[in-house]
Every structure is written in C-alpha cells, then in structure tokens.
Amino acid sequence: MGEHDGARLVLATHNQGKLAELRDLIAAALPAADVGRLVVDAATAGAPDVVEDGTSFEANALLKARSAAAATGLIAVADDSGLAVDVLGGAPGIFSARWSGRHGDDAANLRLLLDQLSDVPDAHRGAQFVCAAALVTPDGTEHVETSALRGVLLREPTGNGGFGYDPVFRPDGLDRSCAELTRAEKNAISHRGRALRALLPHLVAALDPASLTD
C-alpha cells in the first residue's frame, strides 16, 4: 500500500461535505487511528468515477464501493443518499443530486424542489433523508447498512452549514434545519451518521488492528 502512504481505507466519494462527515464518524469510532493517514478520498487513491445506474440507494452504494476497492486494493466505504418527499412518492430519491438536470448543483436542485412544492400545505411537507452505506473489501466481503431521518421541508432555506437539501430540511423534534446544526450535531442524528455507525463494527473487523497505531 506504499503508493497510498499507509492508507488502509478509501472513502469512495468526491463530495467534500460527505468526506468531512465520514472522517469525523470514523475518527470518533477509532480514536486510536490517525484518520488523516488511514483514510484517503477517492481522488487521492485514484478511484474512478462510477456511473450510478443502480435502481436503489443500496445498489449505488455497492457500485461505488466495489469499484473503489477493485481500483485501489483498499477497503472501500461508500454511501448513496438522498431526499425522499412524501407527496412526490419518494422522489427525488436516487436522483436527488441531479434533480435539476445538472449533477451536484445544490442550489438548482433545492430551488426546483421548493418550486414544485410551493402549493403544498405545511401539514403535507413530510420527507426523509435516506442513506445506504456500503463496505467492500478487496477480497470481496460486503456489508450494507441503511438508515433514515424523518423531518419536514421548509419553504425557504435557513442556515449556512451542511450541503445538498440540508437548508430546507428540519428534522422531527428540532426547531432548526440541518444547515443550522453543527457538524457534530448533524452527525449524531443524521441518516448518514446512523448508517455509518451501523457499518463501523464491520469496518473495525476488516481493518488490521496494527494499522491503527503503527
């Protein structure tokens, strides 16, 4: 693994917001690890972009993790996540990142969604963030965990944190949007945080314990 400077794990994402959240979660679960050395992102590891043509969050997460593990020889973790709106029958769903037609244009995606829901009353603006997190090892071991975060959609964005649809999503039981939460607060309750925490025992089992402290 010398070409990766001691890395043992690749996070199969090019999304910097997701990368920061995933690194925080792994650092909390593996306090003895030098996460900066242990974990590399897809670009650093040389993992290629993947056509996400699966028909579910689980399928797309596995596509990304399998590709990264095969390309790098490292343990790979990937997630696929999105927003499922009740009155839209679960859409945008797996198309959340390209809802406006341009992949990764958060502002355009968010504005289109708000326009589509402009006449929907507050009582019917329920939605959930959904995440599937996948772990694939170079020898072909695979695990997938899924989780969701229920909430309601606001009429206008609030907050400057987070990414994606965070500024218009208020989790049930809170009076702030996800974009108004600190990263630690969001990780504690988020769909991604829950799915990754469920995956972490499998990750710890897959890692060589010596790689955490040497």
Image (tube, rainbow, N blue to C red):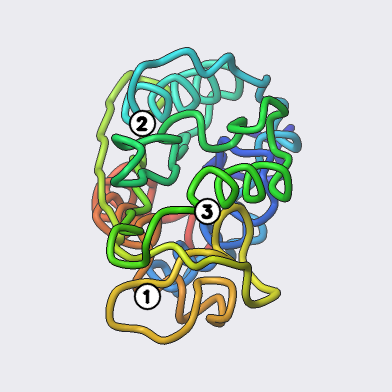
- Sort mark 2 into few (<14), some (14-19) or many (20+) by Cα contacts within 10 Å: many
The answer to whether residue 146 is above or below residue 50 is below
Q: Where does residue 154 sit, x and y in percent of width and height? A: 49, 67
Task: Say what secondary structure mark 2 lies in.
Answer: helix
Do labels 2 and 1 touch, CB within 8 Å? no
Q: How far is the residue under mark 3 from the one under mark 2?
A: 27 Å
Task: Say what secondary structure mark 1 lies in.
Answer: helix
- Image-based side of 50 in relation to 14, left or right: left
Q: Which of marks 3 and 2 is nearer the N terminus?
A: 2
- Sort mark 3 into few (<14), some (14-19) or many (20+) by Cα contacts within 10 Å: few
- Kind of residue sitting beneath label 1: Ala
Quarter-wise, where is residue 152 in the image?
A: bottom left
Residue at image position (69%, 38%) is: 104
- In the picture of the structure, the residue carrying the numbered disc 3 is 118
Q: Nearer the viewer, mark 2 or mark 1?
A: 2
Q: Which numbered dot is residue 188?
A: 1
The answer to whether residue 138 is above or below residue 121 is above
Q: Which of marks 3 and 2 is in front?
A: 3
- Image-based side of 111 in relation to 137, left or right: right
Which residue is nearer to you in this view: 131 or 97?
97
Q: Where does residue 182 sit, x and y in percent of width and height? A: 56, 82
Q: How far is the residue under mark 2 from the one under mark 1?
A: 21 Å
